[in-house]
Amino acid sequence: MMVAPAISNADVESAYARWAPFYDAAFALVMRPGRKAAAAAINRLGGRILDVGIGTGLELPMFRSDIDLVGVDLSGPMLEIARKRVAELGLSHVEALLVMDAMNLEFADGDFDAVVAPYVLTVVPDPRRMLDEVARVVKPGGEIVLVNHIGAESGVVEVVERWLGKYSDRLGWNPRFPWAVLGDWIAARDDIELLERRPVAPLKLFTLTRLRRK
């Protein structure tokens, strides 16, 4: 059974302070298809949107200009880059970019029409707690759009992920995230339904998941 190694908020903050200056150069291309897929799902919905784990704001230009968007991230250095992107591109649909813990969202219940969280589940110390918070702040009938790497169960990829997992605290994410964490959470919630689960490029490394709060 795949066991997620321990990671703390302090690990994440430290890692992404290091990643911030070259995060876009390292990850923009490989994560772009997943971000585009997540933004497309949100663009069909519209309304007031919360983007959890906004990072450097790579997906911000992908959202419709009439969407009212709030972005949160634990990393101040990453958010500084996102703020520069908003200013340089004139992204007036971005309401606010806030330093915030995804496991303790400082918003009222049902504050958003939808929530998008690209590449975040592998970063937070307690994914279930983050999912509880995301479900709390989305309105009944609203959607939750996730993009995440799901760890391999066998083969060469599983071996590589197991090796990388030893360095989760330094990387700032968990390379061995099992689908069961998300699947079991959905199954345990009477108010959450799975709308879609599909692989996205490149090489089906990532999974797009759409949920609805009943």
Image (cartoon, rainbow, N blue to C red):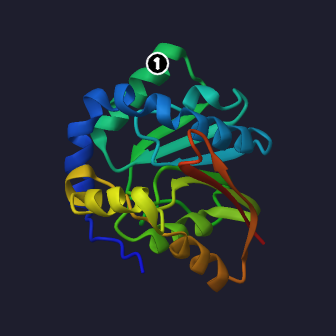
In this rendering, position of residue 85 left or right of residue 36: left
Q: Residues within 10 Å of mark 1 (few under 14, many from 20)?
A: few
Residue drawn at x 26%, y 37% is 19
Image mark count: 1
* Viewer-proximal residue among 127 and 103: 127
The quadrant holding residue 85 is top left
Q: Quadrant of the N terminus?
A: bottom left
Residue occupied by mark 1: 87
Question: Which amino acid does the dot numbered 1 rest on?
Answer: Ala
How far from the left and from the top, in percent, is residue 191?
A: 72, 78
Instruction: Judge whether residue 102 can be spotted in this image.
Output: no
Image vertical order of residue 185 relative to residue 171, above or below:
below
Mark 1 secondary-structure assignment: helix
What is the quadrant of the C terminus in the image? bottom right
Position of residue 27 in the picture relative to residue 191 (left or right): left
Residue positioned 38% across, 28% down in the render: 24
Depth check: 113 or 22 in front? 22
Q: Is residue 59 left or right of residue 3?
A: right
Up/down of 91 relative to 211, above or below: above
Q: Which residue is rendered at x = 63% and y = 45% of the image?
A: 200
* Residue 128 vs residue 114, the one in the foreground: 128
Name the image quarter holding residue 140: bottom right
Residue 196 image position (x, y, % from top left): 75, 59
Outermost residue toward the front in this view: 155
Give the answer, above or below, for where 161 lies relative to 89: below
- How far from the left and from the top, in percent, is residue 78? 33, 36
Residue 114 horizontal/vertical position (percent) = 68, 53
Q: Residue at x 47, y 67 (%)?
A: 130
Image side of residue 42 versus residue 95, left or right: right
Q: Is residue 29 visible?
A: yes
